[in-house]
């Protein structure tokens, strides 16, 4: 586990529903990666709220180094 608490350096493929609100974990502490479970409380960080326009599978970032939050762009520096 790195400093942010992130457990994985690999993205997670999930099926997202159109027009549904999702909360992407920004702190890396969530046990429900890549989604927020409230573990950020007290860190000063908040989840990223997002909605997709179409129901489809997507790759969400777990390493927290993406430049296209919350989607994986394989930007990792390691």
Image (cartoon, grey):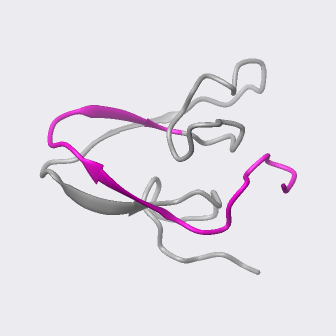
Above or below 26: residue 60: below
Percent position (x, y) of residue 10? 59, 69
Relative to 47, is 19 on the left or the right?
left
For the stretch drawn in magenta, the main secondary structure is loop
Please report the residue visible at 76 percent of the width from the left and 81 percent of the height from the top: 78
Check if residue 2 falls in the magenta segment: yes
Of residues 8 and 19, the one nearer the viewer is 8
Count of marks, rendered view: 0
Relative to 44, is 54 on the left or the right?
left
Please report the residue visible at 47 percent of the width from the left and 73 percent of the height from the top: 73
Check if residue 76 falls in the magenta segment: no
Percent position (x, y) of residue 47? 54, 33
Residue furthest to the top: 42
Above or below 4: residue 57: below
Report the span colored magenta.
Answer: 1-24
Relative to 35, is 40 on the left or the right?
right
Please report the residue visible at 58 percent of the width from the left and 76 percent of the height from the top: 75
Residue furthest to the bottom: 78
Relative to 72, is 63 on the left or the right?
right
Above or below 10: residue 21: above
User: Residue 58 appears in which quarter of the rendering?
Assistant: bottom left
Please report the residue visible at 26 percent of the width from the left and 60 percent of the height from the top: 57
Q: In the picture, which quadrant includes the N terminus?
A: bottom right
Percent position (x, y) of residue 27? 68, 40
Percent position (x, y) of residue 28? 69, 44
């Amino acid at each position: 586990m790195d400093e942010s608490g992130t457990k994985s350096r690999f993205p997670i493929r999930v099926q997202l529903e159109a027009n549904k609100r999702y909360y992407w974990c920004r702190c890396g502490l969530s046990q429900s990666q890549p989604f927020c479970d409230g573990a950020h409380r007290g860190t000063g960080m908040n989840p990223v709220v997002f909605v997709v326009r179409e129901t489809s599978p997507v790759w969400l970032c777990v390493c927290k180094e993406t430049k296209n939050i919350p989607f994986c762009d394989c930007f990792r520096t390691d």
